DNA sequence: CCATTACGATTACGCCTGTAATCTGAACGC
DNA sequence: GCGTTCAGATTACAGGCGTAATCGTAATGG
C-alpha cells in the first residue's frame, strides 16, 4: 500500500513525472513521433518552427532528462534520446488537470463548453457518437 | 534603463487578457462566484484552503488588476474587486489551448482519451448524449 | 600528433510565479 | 490631535522557464 504522499523521486514506469513545461513538451512531441533521436535531429524537427537554436534544444533535452522524462543512450560521443513517459500518460495527466481545474473534475461541462464554442466539427461529433456507441457495448 | 520592456498591449473588451497563472486563477474563481469582494473576503474564501496569507492574496489581486483581469472600485479605504473577463471566456481559452496543444485542435481525440481513461462517469455520458441530441435539432 | 570539430555540461540571465514582509498613508478610537 | 490600525503599494526573493553563449573534452581529418 503506497501512501500517496510519496513525492520523492519515484519513477514508476509509464506515467508522468516532474511536470513538463510548454517548450519541453514541444521537444517531447518530436521524440514521441520517432525515437531515439539525437539533439541535432530534434532541432531539425523544431528549431525552424519555433525559432530556436541548437543550444536551446540541448538545454530542454537536459532538463527533460533531469526530470526523468527522457532517457539517454550513448552513441559514440553523442546521446540518443528516448521518452521515458508515454505520450498517452502525459496527455491523460494534462487533460485531467484541466478538467479538474476548470470543470470541477466533470468532463461533461468541458464537452458542453466545446460544443457551445463551436469547437466541435461534424467529424468530431460523428466520432464521439461512434465512441459512445462503442462504450455502450 | 531603456531596456525596452514590451510595450503595453491593448485589451479588447471581453475575452482573455494577459495569461492568468494557476494561483491567480484560484483568486479569479472566488470572484467569479461572487463579486465584488474585498481582498479580505477573497482571503476568507481561499487562504485556509491554499495555505495562503493575506499578503499573498493582495499580491495576486494586484497582478490581476495589472493584467486587466480585474477591476477595482474604491469603497472607503479599500477596494472592491470585480472580474473584467468572463469565466466562460477564460475557460474557453484554456480549453482550446489544451485541445490545440495535445490533440491537434480536434476535440474528438480528447473525448476519446477521457473515455478510455475512464474519466467519464455515467452521468457525464448521459449528459453528453443529451447535448448531442440537442445539437442535432 | 595536432588543430579543428562536434558534443554534452556548465553558466547566464531576464521574466514570471509563488509567497511574503515591509512601507506609507488614511481612518478611527479616545 | 495622536497613536493604533488597516488598506493598498512597494520591495523581496527563490525557483522555474525560455533562450542561449561559453567551456571542456573527446573524436577526427590531416
Image (cartoon, coloured by chain):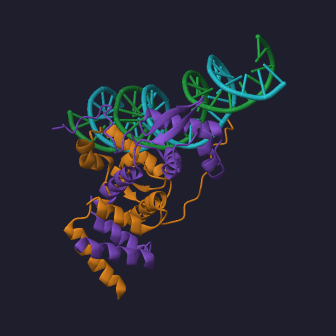
Chain colours: A purple, B orange, C green, D cyan
Tell me if A99 is positioned left or right of A20 in this view.
Answer: left
Q: Nearer the viewer, residue B120 or C29?
A: B120
Q: Nearer the viewer, residue B3 or A83?
A: A83
Residue ranking furthest to the bottom? B137
Instruction: Give coordinates of residue B57: x percent, y percent.
Output: 34, 43
A23 relative to B104, above or below: above
Q: Residue at x 38, y 74 (%)?
A: A127
Q: Quadrant of the C terminus of chain A?
A: bottom left
Q: Residue at x 45, y 57 (%)?
A: B102
Instruction: Give coordinates of residue A133: x percent, y percent.
Output: 28, 76
Residue ranking furthest to the left? A1
Q: Quadrant of the N terminus of chain A?
A: top left
Instruction: Give coordinates of residue A3: x percent, y percent.
Output: 18, 37
The reply to whether residue B75 is in sight is no
Q: Residue at x 38, y 66 (%)?
A: B88
Q: Quadrant of residue A7?
A: top left
Instruction: Give coordinates of residue A113: x percent, y percent.
Output: 37, 70
Q: Quadrant of residue A114?
A: bottom left
Q: Nearer the viewer, residue B37 or D12?
A: D12
The reply to whether residue A96 is in sight is yes
Q: Residue at x 36, y 40 (%)?
A: A17
Count numbered badges in the picture: 0
Tell me if C3 is positioned left or right of B123 in this view.
Answer: right
Amino acid at each position: 500500500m503506497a501512501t500517496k504522499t510519496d513525492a520523492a523521486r519515484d519513477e514508476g514506469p509509464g506515467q508522468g513525472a516532474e511536470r513538463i513545461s510548454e517548450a519541453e513538451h514541444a521537444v517531447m512531441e518530436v521524440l514521441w513521433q520517432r525515437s531515439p533521436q539525437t539533439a541535432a535531429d530534434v532541432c531539425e524537427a523544431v528549431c525552424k518552427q519555433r525559432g530556436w537554436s541548437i543550444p536551446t534544444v540541448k538545454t530542454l533535452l537536459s532538463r527533460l532528462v533531469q526530470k526523468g522524462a527522457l532517457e539517454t543512450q550513448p552513441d559514440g560521443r553523442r546521446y540518443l534520446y528516448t521518452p521515458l513517459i508515454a505520450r498517452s500518460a502525459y496527455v491523460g495527466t494534462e487533460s485531467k488537470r484541466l478538467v479538474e481545474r476548470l470543470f470541477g473534475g466533470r468532463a461533461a461541462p468541458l464537452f458542453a463548453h466545446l460544443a457551445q464554442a463551436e469547437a466541435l466539427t461534424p467529424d468530431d461529433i460523428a466520432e464521439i457518437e461512434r465512441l459512445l456507441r462503442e462504450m455502450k457495448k
